[in-house]
Each structure stands twice: as structure tokens, then as C-alpha cells.
Amino acid sequence: MSHSPTRREFLQASSGLLAGIGMTSLLPAVAKANAGRRLTVSCRDANLPRHGFEDCWAALKHIGAEGVEVAVGEDLSFAGMHHPAKKYSAASAAGIEEFKADAAAAGMRATALLLANNFAQRPEFEIKWCAKAARVAQALGAKAIRIDAAPPRRMPTDKFLDLAVTTLKKIIAKTESTGVAFGVENHGLANNPDFLKPLIDRVGSPRFGLTLDTGNFYWYGFPRLRLYELYDLFAPHVVHTHCKSIRYPADKRNVRRPIGWEYEKYTCPIYEGDIDFTRVVAILNKVGYANDLCIEDESLGHFKEAERPEVLKKEIEYLKGLR
């Protein structure tokens, strides 16, 4: 999913401040319990190469991924998991079992599901959809579901925050038996800590936290040195990740930039970017994070199609060396 000019136009109307933020960990004993565990290195299904590979499983094996984040359609289809003879779907028990069996045969698992939500315009639908997705995640053994919290352009932020909190509390209550966590991505307005902090605080559940997108805070305009403060601040609430990076000119790295400044030009593979993933992984390990490091590379368009699998493979190897 690219950051379109329309999205930038909206985001420029909703910038926020970082000062004065404090947060209490929701995971008090997790670090000790997860000591010594190796984080799974996964990839978004949207990034999986298709050309030259028999199916999604062959692509995952080639790049060295250990798991996959699966985008779930409103009909519970898995359109991003390409296969020449099958259309994966979780709309039936048989479909879930087929996907599980094929994943197991490939030595893979779903580390997270991805939903593209619209809480403002259809909250009741979102509650039902999230509940269905949570049952699917439970059946697949996926620990988390990535969700969106993006308001319509003309809705005041405080009004949308109230609506999102109310809707998410209902979702958490309705999915209690699944044990699956929901992680709102710091995507759009949720890059603003003045929105993200109260959203997490007010929902107030250990099953609601953050899908940490490492590149999005940087895209939002925060100086590079501020990124690690943000990662550290929200780390206790991270339930899933999107690992991506940007390589800005030296004179733009540690200054506040306009939201989305030159993103398409400077986005790059994580091993070439400005973000220090050694520090990112250390921050996550410190709080006992135990899910995945998930590649979401939005720079692949800079490379020829035949080069993209090798870029992903190199990113996977890079993360495996850090976990």
C-alpha cells in the first residue's frame, strides 16, 4: 500500500506533538517469560514475488521467510496468497484447514492477519468482520491482527478518537475467547503520538496495541533521533511489526520534515536505510516482544522484477542476523 498524495493532503491537517507523553507497560512479566526466544522473520503477502515461482509457498521459501502476514478480504479471502490451482479463503472450515495444511507442508505459518478498516463509516460491520478474523487467526495460530484507524478527511480528530475507542472496546469484548491481539498500525493519523497514546490508553486492554511500522514515523516527518524514543515509548504495546526504511539525504535526517516528504524517491530496503534495526530489535527484545519481524518493502518498484526476490531475501537474512 503506497502513500498517495491524497493521503498526504489529509495527513498534513493532523500533525501533533511528541512532548508530554507517558505510558504504562501492559506486559509486566513478558520479558522474563520470553527470554531467549528467537523472533520469527516474516513477509507481507503483498510483497511476495510471483514471476518465476510456482506459488506463494515457493516464493516464501526462496526469500527465506519463516512466516507470512496474510491480508484478509471482507469475504475472508486470502487474495495475496497466490497459487495457480487454489484460491485460499477462510470463509469455511475446510478452507481454513486447506490453508493450514499447505502452510505446514511448506514449513510456514501465518504470523498475523491484515485488515483495512473503516471504523468511521461502518463501525458495526467492522465489529463483525474483526470478530470473524479473530476466529480465523485463532484457528491459524496467528498472534495478531493488523488494523487501521484512519478518520475521514472532514471528521474532527477528537470525534473520531471517541468513535474508534468505542468500536475497539466492542471488538475486544467480542473476541475475548480467541486470545488474539489487535495492533493498530502507526499509519496516517496514528503516527501522531497525541492520537495514538490516548487510543491505546482508553481502549485499555492487553489485547490491543500497536503494529509498529518502523518507517512510518520517519515518513511522518520525525527526525531520525526521535524515532528511537518513539519505538521505546510504544514498545511495550507492540504486537506485530512492519519493517521498512527510508534513506534521506544527510541534511534531512535529523530535522523535522513535511509529512511524506519525497517518500517514493527515498524509500529503500532495510539494509540500506537510515533506521538502525539493531537498535529496533534490541528495544523490542528488552520488553519481551515475541511475535514477528515482518518485511514490508515499499521500495521494490525501484528494482527490476527479477531483482526483487533477491532484495527480499537479503532483507530476511539481515533481520535473522539481528534477532
Image (cartoon, rainbow, N blue to C red):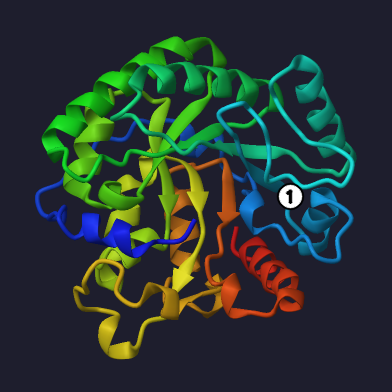
The local crowd at label 1, few if under 14, some if 14 to 19, many if 20 or more residues have their Cα within 10 Å, is many
| Dot 1 amino acid type | Glu
- Which is nearer the eye, 221 or 64? 221
Q: Is residue 136 above or below residue 221?
A: above
Report the residue at 60% width, 18% height from top: 135
Report the residue at 16% width, 56% height from top: 15
- Which is nearer the eye, 135 or 53? 53
* Quarter of the image where one finds residue 236: top left
Task: Please tell me whether mark 1 sits on a helix, a strand or a loop.
Answer: loop
Percent of width and height locating residue 238: 42, 42
Task: Using the rendered image of the protein, determine whether residue 41 is visible from the camera's viewpoint.
Answer: no
Percent of width and height locating residue 302: 57, 79
Q: Is residue 117 above or below residue 318?
A: above
Number of numbered labels in the structure image? 1
Position of 263 with respect to 103 (left or right) is: left
Disc 1: which residue: 66
Percent of width and height locating residue 145: 52, 33
Report the residue at 25% width, 68% height from top: 221
Task: Using the rendered image of the protein, determine whether residue 8 is visible from the camera's viewpoint.
Answer: yes
Percent of width and height locating residue 242: 50, 53
Q: Quadrant of the C terminus?
A: bottom right
